[in-house]
Image: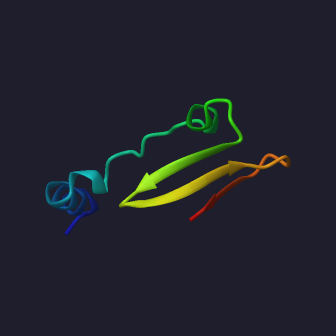
Amino acid sequence: MTTQNLLSTVSRARPDAVAKPRRVSSGALLGGQRVVLIEHNGECYQLRHTLRGKLILTK
């Protein structure tokens, strides 16, 4: 099976498997704040922008 055939098979099975991921800036996520809460599958996560410019995601 060629790479193209494999990609075609995967994309039919799971269209999101080969789709290019959406890129979002951290500024757009944080909206000018240092912390944003993200809900995922009923759980709450905290995305924090540190004073050293790092991003930390915690549950």
Quadrant assignment, res 8? bottom left
In the picture, which quadrant includes the N terminus?
Answer: bottom left
Across and down, in percent, residue 48 comes to 68, 50
| Residue nearest the observer in this picture, 57 or 44 | 44
The single residue placed furthest to the bottom in the displayed view is 1
Across and down, in percent, residue 58 comes to 61, 63
Q: Residue at x 37, y 60 (%)?
A: 42
Q: Is residue 56 above or below residue 35?
A: below
Q: Residue at x 21, y 51 (%)?
A: 15
Q: Is residue 26 above or below residue 31?
A: below
Lateral position of residue 26 relative to residue 20, left or right: right
- Number of marks present in the image shown: 0
Q: Residue at x 31, y 53 (%)?
A: 18
| Residue nearest the observer in this picture, 41 or 8 | 41
| Residue nearest the observer in this picture, 5 or 47 | 47
In the picture, which quadrant includes the C terminus?
Answer: bottom right
Lateral position of residue 33 relative to residue 10, left or right: right
Lateral position of residue 26 relative to residue 41, left or right: right
Q: Which scheme is used to colour this image of the protein?
A: rainbow
Quadrant assignment, res 32? top right
Across and down, in percent, residue 10 comes to 21, 61
Across and down, in percent, residue 31 comes to 61, 31
Quadrant assignment, res 7? bottom left
Q: Residue at x 56, y 37 (%)?
A: 29
